[in-house]
Amino acid sequence: MIYNLDPNCYYSNRAYLTQWFYDDIMVIVDTETLPLRNELYRESNLHPESQRLQQLIDQHSIKQHVIDVTHNVLPVHTLEKKLTRPILTNDCEYYYRPQSGVVFFPVFLWGFSLRNRLWQNKAFSFDAGSNKVQEIMCLNNRPRWHRTWLWAEFNRLNTISKMTYSFANLEPDSVSYTYPCPLLLPGEEPDNTRNDVGVDLKIYHDTAVNLVTETSVDDIFLTEKTCKPFMARQIPIIVCGAGTNKFLADIGLDMFEDIVPWQSWDSDSNNQSRLEQIASFVDWWVRSGTIMGTYQDLLPRIERNKQYFHSEAFRQHIMTQMNQFKF
């Protein structure tokens, strides 16, 4: 049975881990409380209560522990070194470079491949059709610097009016812009706490290309956002850490490199340079007037992506470390 330090927090629900952990296990989740998260990722000697988390762990009756940091962009190397192991991470660095005590678990790719809601209580859709009528979408609800830069750049290029674009808010310390903000979809209300996990919105059924602005551009940490173009039968353009597209191609997904020239920017470690190249390509493609025709030409490959994403072969590819894990 899976136990949590905070059993009343729905976000801490990790019942899906029971297929790997059969005995009574305490799963320690970084998002249960902010103090707990601070203790997980503290800098040594900077916090007077440096043993607080370990004391919470030690006083609990369950003595087998797993630390699960798969849900947030929190690098494993910053974890307190004395904490218990194993650690489950969604950081794709560990797909290529396995490390003792760390297990690569791409929870969103795995869960959404299975059409598993994970910790979410509310039902949502994992499927959208291929009868597309609009060219390109880009949804941005929570503020991040790279989302702000792209929104401002597409405004500067006057491309944003040719896209289905949402941008809810600037970061608190952002420079001021004269561009309209918030930029919302019809009927949408600004709400930074909203999390549209699935592909229920009509825009996913209507739009051929999904410009995905992931949570971070510093790490290859993939959330439900990256899953959506594959679930919704779309061509993906992924804005994330350097190496993201290579990782997705390495696990067998078609990233359409003959159409989207991600190989020219994917290995660029300079975040700003990578964003500029992506914006330049998107601007050119939107102005070319070829997106819908290209989408129709690519439909067989897009459908193969959809079927493969939901396949056992895909899950076997990404879950090697979890499936080989033993306490």
Image (cartoon, helix red, strand yellow):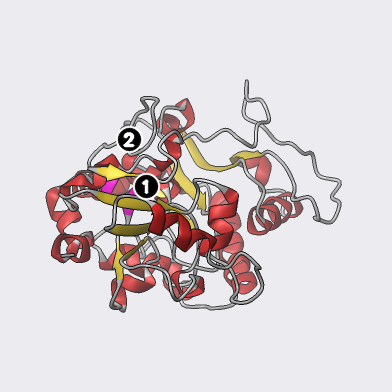
Seen in the picture, residue 39 relative to 13 is either above or below; the reply is: below
Q: What stretch of residues is rendered in magenta?
A: 107-111
Front residue of 291/94: it is 94
User: What residue is rendered at 33% in x and 68% in y?
Assistant: 85
Tell me if mark 1 has few (under 14), some (14-19) or many (20+) residues whose alpha carbon lies within 10 angstroms of its own: many
Residue 258 visible in the current orientation: yes
Residue 28 picture location, percent across and down: 40, 53
Q: Identify the residue under disc 2.
A: 117
The relative height of residue 82 versus residue 2 in the rendered view (above or below) is below
Residue 163 rendering spot, x and y as whole percentages: 59, 41
- Amino acid tagged 2: Arg
Magenta span: predominant SS is helix
Q: Which mark is residue 97?
A: none
| Distance from Cα at disc 1 to Cα at disc 2 | 13 Å
Measured along the vertical axis of the image, is residue 189 above or below residue 126? above
Q: For label 2, count other residues whose C-alpha is less than 10 Å away and answer few (under 14), some (14-19) or many (20+).
A: some
The structure residue drawn at horizontal position 37% and vertical position 45%, both measured from the top left corner, is 4
> Is residue 302 visible in this depiction of the protein?
no
Determine whether, in the image, residue 191 is placed left or right of residue 58: right
The N terminus lies in which quarter of the figure?
top left
Residue name at image x 42 percent, y 69 percent: 83
Tag 1 secondary structure? helix
* Disc nearer the start of the sequence (1/2): 2
Secondary structure under the numbered disc 2 in the rendered image: loop
Q: Is residue 109 magenta?
A: yes
Q: Which residue is mark 1?
A: 227
Q: Quadrant of the C terminus?
A: bottom left
The amino acid at mark 1 is Cys
Query: Is 131 drawn above or below residue 150 in the view shown?
Result: above
